[in-house]
Amino acid sequence: MEALFAVTLGILSASGVYLLLRARTFPVVMGLTLLSYAVNLFLFAMGRLTSGAPAVIGRSAEYADPLPQALVLTAIVIGFAITAFLLVLSLRGLGELKSDHVDGEQR
């Protein structure tokens, strides 16, 4: 299970960085989204990867840490808001500059 998480984190991070380095606005937004997904998986994995364990402390001998779960839930909401803001910002830049390059130049 840990190897699958490590490979998934690596693929998401590498894809996100690759898309961030593109010169168009939509791949940059998608790259930031993929990086946020990678961070969410990393935070979720910090709470020990156990299946079937309750998130309530004291109910059983093993429990899942509820703090990373709360952090991931908060990060999902913040990531959605940032993605919506970036999409609106990129659409406004496309409308005003008539280009979707991140530096505003046509090539």
Image (cartoon, rainbow, N blue to C red):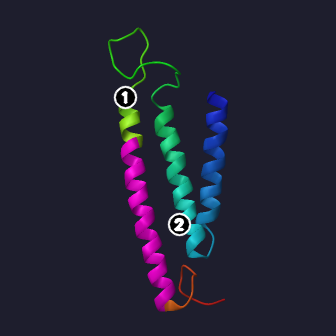
Query: In terms of secondary structure, where does tag 1 sit?
Result: helix
Do the CB atoms of the residues marked 1 and 2 lie less than 8 Å apart? Answer: no
Numbered range of the magenta stretch:
73-96
Query: In terms of secondary structure, where does tag 2 sit?
Result: helix
Q: Which mark is on residue 29?
A: 2
State the quadrant of the C terminus.
Answer: bottom right
Q: Nearer the viewer, residue 13 or 54?
A: 54
Q: Of callouts 1 and 2, which one flags the residue occurring earlier in the amino acid sequence?
A: 2
- Three-letter amino acid code at disc 1? Pro
State the quadrant of the N terminus.
Answer: top right
Q: Gap between marks 1 and 2, in whole Å?
A: 30 Å
Determine crowd level at label 2: few under 14, some 14-19, many 20+ residues with C-alpha closer than 10 A: many
Position of 81 with respect to 6 (left or right) is left
Q: Which mark is on residue 54?
A: none
Q: Is residue 44 magenta?
A: no
- Three-letter amino acid code at disc 2? Val
Q: Which mark is on residue 66?
A: 1
**Residue at the spot x=53%, y=66% of the render?**
29
Position of 47 with respect to 15 (left or right) is left
Q: In the rendered view, would you say 22 is above or below 81?
A: below
Dominant SS type (magenta): helix
**Residue at the spot x=50%, y=19% of the render?**
52
Q: Is residue 82 magenta?
A: yes
Determine crowd level at label 1: few under 14, some 14-19, many 20+ residues with C-alpha closer than 10 A: some
